[in-house]
Amino acid sequence: MELLWTISATLLLCSLLSILWKEFDRRRNRNCYLLDYVCYKPSDDRKLSTELCSDVIARNKRLSVSDYKFLLKVVVNSGISEETYGPRSIIEGREECPTHDDCVDEVDDCMHRTLDELFLRTGISPIDVDVLVVNVSMFAPSPSLTSRIINRYRMREDVNTFSLAGMGCSASPIAIDLVNNIFKTRKRTLAVVVTSESIAPNWYCGTDKSMMLGNCLFRSGGCSFMLTNDPSLKHRAKMSLKCLVRAHLGADDDAYSCAIQREDAEGRVGFHLSKSLPKAAVLAFAENLQRLAPKVLPVGELALYVLRGLRHRLWRSKEARTDAATAARVNFKSGVDHFCLHTGGAAVIDAVGRALGLTKYDVEPARMTLHRWGNTSVSSLWYVLGYMEAKKRLRRKDRVLMLSFGAGFKCNSCLWEVLRDLNDGGAWEDCIRAYPQQTLVNPFMEKFGWVKEA
Amino acid sequence: MTGAPLPLFSSSVKLKYVKRGYQHLVDNFVTFLSIPVMVAVGLELARRGPQEIVGLWRALELDVIHILCSVFVIVFVATVYLMSRPRPVYLVDYACYKPPSNCRVPFSAFMEHTRLINSDEKSVQFQMRILERSGLGEETCLPPANHYIPPRPTMEASRAEAQLVIFSAIDDLIRKTGLKPKDIDILVVNCSLFSPTPSLSAMIINKYKLRSNIRSFNLSGMGCSAGLISIDLARDLLQVHPGSNALVISTEIITPNYYAGNQRSMLLPNCLFRMGAAAILLSNRRRDARRAKYRLVHVVRTHKGADDRAYRCVYEEEDAEGHTGISLSKDLMAIAGEALKSNITTIGPLVLPMSEQLLFFFSLVARKLINPKRKPYIPDFKQAFEHFCIHAGGRAVIDELQKNLELSAEHVEASRMTLHRFGNTSSSSLWYELNYIESKGRMRRGDRVWQIGFGSGFKCNSAVWKCLRTVKTPVDGPWSDCIHRYPVHIPEVVKL
């Protein structure tokens, strides 16, 4: 009957249209856009010069002369400049007994400054925030840091907050992963993420060498950024998240215990970095790249990689002298234009650069960030990104890879696509003209040059 | 001749039954509408007679193609509808940590230790008074480090406690569910007052050799209501990843948080917090639907942090002597009540039957337009839930909620008995309470459970679960050896 046909056809058409619309709507709302980010710039009275570092180290009467020399050597060779920042409690001589207020003030200063500026720049009110994530690895007071932010900015009652702690130096991609997953379940959501690290409560005042490196290398820093999945805000967004890969090697005992917070023989708490850390890092890195490569590289490069691997395997006798690594190397630069490397230290940056086949130009942002800001732990990726933006390197359709390592042992990475030409100076505004610095040698090398002989 | 006075008819009419009738009418409105329609159609068909009906059918001229197409369209539309619904999240099973009896802290031991550690007699007396009125029993447990005089809150001892409680709970869960560690896709851990680096989630990944592509999150500092925050996060992740399961660990580590000072507002946690942990297995796999105990229906989170009074009511700070502790303000009960009201405002429309919602709406209108002094109508949540798990934060919290929600003694029995047997185990207390209800054989298929957690911030979080299969006693859990002794009568004051 005609009527039946018409009804059936209409119903079918409606169903098809509704499926298509649902799929389209889902895809529209699946994207994670970075609206803006603000890196923390502490006040100048918190700068830690090498001389000040030397004084602070000397205050620890338990250290022997050889320990003192060792630490000074670490500071001098670290590639860190005189412009990095430390917490007030250390500069004012209270490093061994920081009060609870010292620790809270340190984190508050970072959160408030960066969030004030973030809300100002984006023009979005705190009332509109739907999700709030804070990750500070080594300090988790009650009420949580997220509650502190809600109280200060008078956010709504139904804000979904998450306070991540203990997740190490690579927690920034973890926070992004959390928000990204939430975005896939809700429409038109706005998320604010604050990443920072707390140094004041974690100063090590003992004599175990493996625990003293943290004292020398970590510096104050932080970043707040705003993410959304609202397609109507896409035109204001800076970048769009393409993929995220997390690799956790905690199942391996050596990897788990290579960077661990514990007590030393005398009962003092410190952050122990063991000699097996580089090996754990390499394994985690390889695991991450294995899963990242298919998502990031163009098909051509992947095909070439497979072919090279096959050729190496089949003609093994002829190619015996060829280095296995170079035979199987993948050119990440075919799929990624800029690399934000975690500024764990000069050695880490160089090692990762070599492994990925990067040039001096590619690792420059990371080296310069280490020089200007030190190892700011979780937020270091954002300072590196800030350098690239201040240098006007980020152009539309460029792809940026963020790569970081952290205790656990984890290696986390995420790939962003730049949505428009970026040129904000941000935290680098006042000093970007001085970069890149030709020499990263510590100016006090002469004065403390005698440590080199030790 | 004076007879007995006439009885008051208004009270004998038994308004209760009127209300019952009204509830039935409104709740089953659609049914009440459809019955007359069906009766009418049935009468019409009966009037026509079978021959006429067959004749009508033939007149439609349907052939196989038409029928197939119609069936196809119906099936297609049904599939689209079913696929577009959010994935259900099932609670396969959960396990709670049962502390060994050598960790017990009976009142006598607690007071003796307190006297030896603390030289201030007033503080000792204050703690004794708290303990007397606390509603705790003699079998609550503290971790080994707290049994030293003075307690030894080292990081090593804290990690040891974490390993003890968490691994025991997970081992128990693995035994009950046959879960393979390599199968775990998502791991969420919440522990408010202890967050070492690497995190507790990394510690679990290390011990059980979990996969390297696991999605792990470690929440900290989020207070006693963090257990439901972890459930919320696990639910969001399970919505995004089909065919996955999630392991949620809720615990509080007591060792590093002993307060060594004398400020009264900070002494309460020492008296009330006890060891505990819960491991929960959530899944969205269809095959787990058959063996799952509960299905997650709603999670509602309310954060009152924007209000300064609420924000400061549970606050970690240093006292005058430099000892760090968590101070609880005197406003705690009032603030808990207000936070609950906010939470109810959101959850009410989701769970209350239409009859209650309409009553609440009419009472609101009446208050606004007719008489502002009229008592607000408190929706009858007993209509929406069969069981209540209220965070065993303290006797006063349970009393306050019982009053606010107009619950009977049986409804809050699980909370009171958990407080008595296990103390305030923070975020895991809700799971001990649920286990109590199951152990008492009260959990039937179709029952709805409301878990309410409160915590620093100030937060009030709720989760609603629906029971999928009747839980048979005896239940393997922390109550298995003592459920026969419960419920016990808990006096107002236990004289020490």
Image (tube, grey):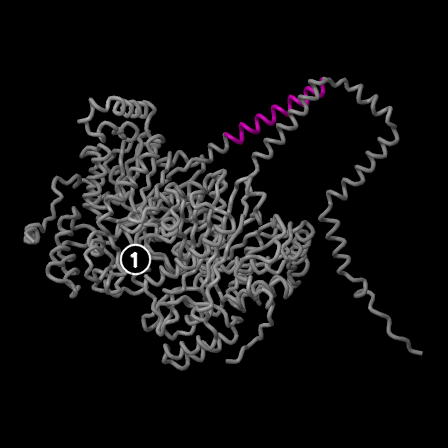
How many marks can you see?
1
Position of residue B454 measured from the top left corner of the image (x, y, whole percent): 50, 60
Kindly identify which residue carries mark 1. Answer: A106
**Residue A27: x, y in percent?**
47, 32
Q: Answer with left or right where residue B391 lies relative to residue B119.
A: right
Q: Which residue type carries mark 1?
A: Glu
For the C terminus of chain A, the image quarter is bottom left
Q: In the shown orientation, is residue A186 left or right of residue B37?
A: left
- Looking at the rendering, which quadrant does residue A61 occupy? bottom left
Measured as percent of width and height from the top left, residue B311 is found at: 44, 61
- Tell me where the magenta segment starts and ends, as one range: A2-23
Chain of the residue under the numbered disc 1 shown in the image: A
Q: Nearer the viewer, residue A47 or A71?
A: A71
| Number of residues whose C-alpha sits closer than 10 Å to that of mark 1, classed few (under 14), some (14–19) or many (20 or more) | many
Secondary element at tag 1: helix
Quadrant of the snapshot with the N terminus of chain A: top right
Reply yes or no: does residue A9 show up in magenta: yes
Q: Could you tell me which residue is drawn at 29 percent across and 65 percent down?
A: A99
Residue B83 appears in view: yes
Mainly helix, strand or loop, the magenta region?
A: helix
Asked whether residue A116 appears in the rendered view, the answer is no
